Amino acid sequence: MEPAQDSQPELRPGDAGFTGFQMHLPENCLEYMLFVRDTTGNTFSALEDVRKAAIRLTDELTGDYIWQRGSFNLELKRDKGLTYLSGQTDYGDSVEDEWLIVYLLRELTKTFKNLWVRVADSDGEFLLVEAANVTPKWLNPENDAHRVWIKDGELKIIPIFQDKKTLSLSDAVGFLKSSPDKLIHSPFIEAEAFYRLEKYPQQITESLHHSMVTIPRKLAHIIHSRPKSIAPATEAFYLRDPLSLKPLFMSIAPLIFPPDDLVTVSIVFTKILFAQLKSQHYDPPPAWQAIIHNAQVASVNDSPATLKTLARLEMGMKITTGYELSAREADKSDNRIVREMAVILGDLEEDGPSALPTDAEIKCWKDVDRDDDESWMNIDYDSFERELDGKDKSGGSVGEGFGDKNTEADLKKIVSRFEAFLNDDKAGIEGAELDEMDEDDDEDEDLEGNEYDEEEDEDDGEDKAVSFDEAQFARMMREMMGFPSDEVDTTVPSSNTLLENPGASSLEAEDEIDEETKEIQKLMAQFEAELKGHGALNLNPKPEKPAKIGDVGKGKQKEIVPANLKSKYDEESESGDDEVDIDYNLAKNLLESFKGQAGLAGPAGNILGMLGINLPQDEGNEDDDEEDEK
């Protein structure tokens, strides 16, 4: 007998096959790969042509655009036998940067017919995330890696082949070269995935914001020379910490941009950068305290001019702080723009103040007085609801809606998707869940869904499967306990009425009560009739004379006489014979038990109370007790 084999030991770092340290994309990072299908064998030349065309297109469309962090870039890469162009961009908080790159790549595929492009971010195949409502069930986050490609401006999907649920990059590229005609192209998936690209290239200029700010003349020169430096400076201010602010508040070293010679100029931001600066609360450092204080005193009268002056000073103070922090760390920065800014500062130190622009020169700058409206930062929820419906302030219908077609379309799409999710019976708490169940289960779920839909159509959306009739339930429970149902609710038919006239009950009761329930009700009705015949359910008995416990057997309590003996009882009463043929022992034992309670609660009293019989308290009749004992 061979010894049992040991289980495979756990792989450690350095062992073959260890995958514990797999590299993943950082958060807010976009990765893109460009492959060419070259039949001439000169792949390097074809890729270089693509790279040069990408540079020209980027300069043409994004010459004045301000990237949040990283910009669009491409470099030649060789890995695992594959040669392609690759790039990564950290887009930070600006999702628009990510979609701008997707737009540039899609435009490249329209120019180069032999170009295949793949894009992914930290969420994986984010294009499929955008089209989650229309993707097929077999495509899920577990097997979608390397399946989504852009070719000729269209979205292509690699199907499952050779029983491979997951694809490596090499397998995907091999399939593109060998079987391009087997790729899946769905207009519905493509429309959803590329929905955000519809607003480009207009979105490139519409995402910018011009604002007038008051800053030192030295800083105005830097920003005019390198307008895109506003992005790293804003990030430095937005991510500031007490340690980095220490030189500004402790006067440890002289300021690089002291607020000595202030000028008011227009600066170009992206809307995200402007919002990040505008929304921050920042106490003035010592060098700015007097300037800000004087502006605050002047703005006490709330005049538009003084308030505008104060707002421009506060914004300028924030921008100057950001550039101060950025310039102090320029030697450690890997940002090319920050290093270029440090070079310009070095030149200014050598040339002196004479190198700074004069007021006349500043007035000649492009858009130096442009000050865009900031109302896009304010949200009025009443007008938001009206404009979402395409109505103006007076409630009338207008054609433009928001006045911003892109915003209006985006918000309406968000609302429509949210409503679709709420109306989706199969959607779970995690959103659009993947269906990994058997086909039989799927058929059962579909069948249940159809039945639900039919009931919903019949009864205005009421879910009959969970409906509850309190009156019906109360009536049935009282009948089960032996109580008369007609005393609870006179509008609810009793069991006798229900059996004699089924039409008197509601349609819902007839549908829900099956044959077994009807049989039980029939027996209960007979039992109720017999108890009433015995007088056990008479809640308000009116005896001519209250009976005592000792009167049992003397014919004085006629209400407990069975119905089948009533006629005989009547005849014997008329003839003067007091003897009654009843279960004397049962009645005697019951009443003796009641007497033994001595006026307290007990089983006999509880049973009689449930039957509706309230016996008077025994006053103690010694003669009757002696007769009972005999």
Image: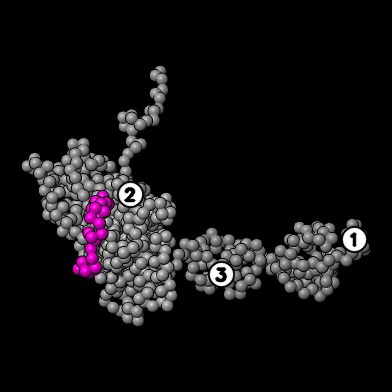
The kind of residue on which mark 2 rests is Glu
Residue 174 in picture, x, y percent from top left: 18, 41
Q: Amino acid at mark 1?
A: Asp
Magenta stretch containing residue 71, yes or no? no
* Location of residue 130 in the rendering, given as x and y in whole percent from the top left corner: 29, 56
Q: Which residue is mark 2?
A: 329
Image quarter hosting the C terminus: bottom right
Identify which amino acid the numbered label 3 is placed on.
Leu
Residue depth check, mark 2 versus mark 1: number of the one nearer the observer: 2
The residue located at (28%, 42%) in the rendering is 166
Q: Are marks 2 and 1 in contact (CB under 8 Å)?
A: no
Decide: few, some or many residues near mark 1? Use Cα within 10 Å; few <14, some 14-19, many ≥20: few
Q: Residue at x 57, y 65 (%)?
A: 473
Q: Is residue 436 left or right of residue 83?
A: right
Secondary structure character of the magenta stretch overall: helix
Q: Position of residue 210 (x, y in %)?
A: 27, 67
Q: Secondary structure at mark 2?
A: loop
Q: Is residue 355 magenta?
A: yes
Q: Residue at x 66, y 64 (%)?
A: 482
Give residue 373's position: percent from left, percent from top. Answer: 30, 71
Range of magenta residues:
338-364
Of 58 and 441, the residue lying toward us:
58
Residue 498: image tag: 3
Which residue has dot 1 on it? 625
Q: Do residues under tags 3 and 1 come within 8 Å of each other at their CB atoms?
A: no
Q: Earlier in the sequence, mark 3 or mark 1?
A: 3
Q: Which mark is residue 11?
A: none
Q: Residues within 10 Å of mark 3 (few under 14, many from 20)?
A: some
Q: In the rendered view, does 10 fall on the left or right side of 108?
A: right
Badge 2: residue crowd in 10 Å (few <14, some 14–19, many ≥20):
some
